[in-house]
C-alpha cells in the first residue's frame, strides 16, 4: 500500500517575506489582505501574541505597534513565484504529485518494507529549505485525510522535526481521539453541527460512526472521509487540476470611486489580469460578466449593485477584444451619483484553446496570438503593467492600498535584491 504525504509550507506568506529579510526570523510578522484590510497570515510569534486570523488591521494597529510587529501587504507575485519553485522541486522529485493549493501538495510514495519513508521526508524538508528557502512540514499516512492530520501535528509539534507519520493503528486512533471532528479535512460547519447533534465530537467517534447514517447525513463525500479515517484510501491523486469553469478578477478600491473614467480603468485592468490567466492555462472564454457595487454597510449614502453578462460571438483570449466587451457591460450598468467600493469581471464559458464553436453567420475575427505572446513575455519579465491597453490608464489612483508591500524580489528586474559591493 502506498504512503500519502502532504507537503505543507509553514506560514507560507510570512516565510516568503522572511526569505529576503532574514532579520525577521523569530520576530512577529503578519501579512494583510487586499487593501490592507485584514490579517491573513501570521508567524508563530504573532500567533502567540493573540492576533487572530481574519481580524481587521485597523482594530489591531495599536497592538501591532506596541509589540513592534512587522506588517506586510500581500505580494502575490512573490508568493506565486516561490510556490512554483517549491512545486517544481516536488514534481522533479516524485512521479505522483497533486498540487492542492499555493502552499500544499500531496505525494503518493511507493510502498517498500526496506525504505525509511520518515527519513526520506525529513531529507525532502531539508532540500526544500536549502534550495528554495521555504520551511515545510510533511504528514505521512495511508490516506490523504490522515496525511492532512499528520501534517498539522508535524507543524505544531517541534519534537516531530517537521515530519509526522501515522501508520500504526493504535497511534492513529489515539490521534483521532484528540482531534475535533470539526478539524477534519472536508468537514464544514454544517456537517459539524449535524455531527454534534448526534453526539459525535472527535475524529475517532466519526470514524466509528454508522456508515449508513453518515451517508444519509453527510452524503457520499462524508462517507469517503470516514473510510479514509479508517485507513482505506478512496480519494485518488489528481495529477492534473480539473478544468476551471470561470476566472474572476476583482478588487476593493482604496477609496470610493464616483467617476465613470476611473471605473473604466479598473475594469480594463482587471480584464487584462484575467486574460493573462486565461492564456496561461491555454483556455478561451465565451462570455464575460461585469459587476460593481457600493458599500453595503453605508446604505445611508445610497446602495447600488448591478451586473451585466456579455456573450461573445466566438471564444477569445485576446485582451483588447475582451476589454471591449467588458467596457460595454460597464456602460450598461454604470449610474452616476454613487460611491462605488468594488468592481470586477468574471470570464465564463471557458473552453480549451483551439476547441471552439465558430459563428454560423459572422466572420471569424483574427486572434492576435503573436501580439499576446509578446505582451505576456514582456510583462512577465519587466512587471505586470509594462505593456497594457490604453483604457487601463496610467496613474491608477483608484487602485487598492498596499502601503506595506515588499518588492517583487523574484519577478521584476528593477526590484531584484542587492547584496552590496561594487557599482
Image (cartoon, rainbow, N blue to C red):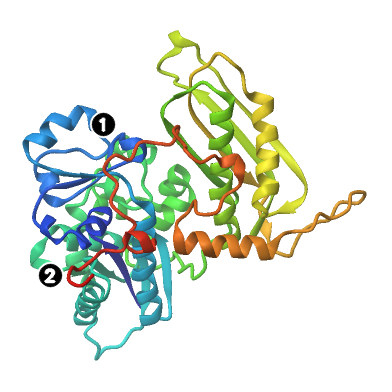
Quarter of the image with the C terminus is: bottom left
Query: Which residue is drawn at the image coordinates 50% and 15% (left, top)?
Result: 303
The secondary element bearing badge 2 is classed as: loop
Residue 100 locus on image (x, y percent): 41, 61
Query: In the image, which is nearer the foreground, mark 2 or mark 1?
Result: 1
Residue assigned mark 1: 56
Residue 147 locus on image (x, y percent): 29, 65
3D distance between C-alphas at marks 2 and 1: 33 Å
Query: Which residue is drawn at the image coordinates 20% and 38% (left, top)?
Result: 52
Instruction: Give the quarter of the image for residue 235.
Output: bottom left
Residue extending farthest right = 361
Quarter of the image with the N terminus is: bottom left
Residue 358 locus on image (x, y percent): 84, 55
Query: Which residue is drawn at the image coordinates 45% and 19% (left, top)?
Result: 296
Residue extending farthest top = 300
Instruction: Name the disc covering residue 328, or none.
Output: none
Asked if one can make out residue 1 in the rendered structure from this viewpoint, the answer is: no
Residue 98 or residue 204, whichever sits in front = 98
The secondary element bearing badge 1 is classed as: loop
- 122 up-or-down from 227: above or below: below
Asked if one can make out residue 210 in the rendered structure from this viewpoint, the answer is: yes
Residue extending farthest bottom = 114
Residue assigned mark 2: 161
In the figure, is residue 123 to the left or right of 25? right
- 353 up-or-down from 361: above or below: below
In the figure, is residue 230 to the left or right of 152? right
**Which of the two discs, 2 and 1, labels the residue nearer the N terminus?**
1
Residue 315 or residue 145, whichever sits in front = 315
In the figure, is residue 153 to the left or right of 255? left
Amino acid at each position: 500500500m502506498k504512503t500519502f504525504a502532504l507537503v505543507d509550507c509553514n506560514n507560507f506568506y510570512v516565510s516568503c517575506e522572511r526569505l529576503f529579510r532574514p532579520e525577521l526570523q523569530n520576530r512577529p510578522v503578519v501579512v494583510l489582505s487586499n487593501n490592507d484590510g485584514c490579517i491573513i497570515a501570521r508567524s508563530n510569534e504573532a500567533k502567540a501574541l493573540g492576533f487572530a486570523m481574519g481580524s481587521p488591521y485597523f482594530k489591531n494597529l495599536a497592538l501591532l505597534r506596541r509589540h513592534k510587529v512587522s506588517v506586510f501587504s500581500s505580494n502575490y507575485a512573490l508568493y506565486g513565484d516561490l510556490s512554483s519553485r517549491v512545486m517544481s522541486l516536488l514534481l522533479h522529485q516524485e512521479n505522483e504529485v497533486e498540487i492542492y493549493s499555493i502552499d500544499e501538495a500531496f505525494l503518493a510514495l511507493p510502498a517498500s518494507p526496506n525504505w525509511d519513508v520518515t527519513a526520506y521526508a525529513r531529507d525532502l524538508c531539508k532540500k526544500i529549505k536549502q534550495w528554495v528557502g521555504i520551511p515545510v512540514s510533511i504528514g505521512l499516512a495511508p490516506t490523504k485525510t490522515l496525511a492532512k492530520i499528520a501534517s498539522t501535528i508535524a507543524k505544531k509539534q517541534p519534537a516531530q522535526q517537521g515530519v509526522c507519520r501515522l501508520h500504526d493503528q493504535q497511534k492513529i486512533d489515539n490521534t483521532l481521539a484528540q482531534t475535533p471532528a470539526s478539524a477534519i479535512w472536508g468537514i464544514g460547519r454544517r456537517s459539524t453541527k449535524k455531527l454534534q447533534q448526534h453526539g459525535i465530537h472527535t475524529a475517532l467517534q466519526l470514524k466509528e460512526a454508522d456508515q449508513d447514517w453518515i451517508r444519509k447525513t453527510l452524503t457520499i463525500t462524508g462517507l469517503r472521509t470516514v473510510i479514509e479515517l479508517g485507513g482505506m484510501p478512496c480519494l485518488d491523486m489528481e495529477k492534473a487540476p480539473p478544468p476551471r469553469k470561470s476566472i474572476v478578477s476583482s478588487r476593493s478600491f482604496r477609496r470610493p470611486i464616483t467617476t465613470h473614467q476611473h471605473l473604466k480603468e479598473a475594469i480594463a485592468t482587471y480584464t487584462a489580469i484575467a486574460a493573462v490567466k486565461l492564456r496561461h492555462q491555454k483556455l478561451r472564454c465565451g462570455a464575460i460578466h461585469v459587476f460593481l457595487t457600493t458599500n453595503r454597510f453605508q446604505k445611508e449614502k445610497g446602495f447600488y449593485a448591478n451586473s451585466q453578462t456579455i456573450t461573445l460571438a466566438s471564444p477569445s483570449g485576446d485582451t483588447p477584444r475582451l476589454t471591449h466587451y467588458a467596457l460595454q457591460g460597464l456602460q450598461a450598468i454604470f449610474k452616476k451619483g454613487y460611491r462605488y467600493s468594488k468592481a470586477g469581471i468574471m470570464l465564463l464559458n471557458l473552453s480549451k484553446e483551439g476547441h471552439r464553436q465558430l459563428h454560423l453567420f459572422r466572420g471569424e475575427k483574427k486572434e492576435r496570438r503573436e501580439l499576446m505572446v509578446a505582451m505576456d513575455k514582456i510583462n512577465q519579465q519587466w512587471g505586470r503593467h509594462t505593456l497594457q491597453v490604453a483604457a487601463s490608464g496610467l496613474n491608477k489612483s483608484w487602485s487598492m492600498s498596499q502601503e506595506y508591500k515588499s518588492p517583487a524580489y523574484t519577478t521584476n528586474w528593477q526590484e531584484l535584491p542587492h547584496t552590496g559591493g561594487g557599482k
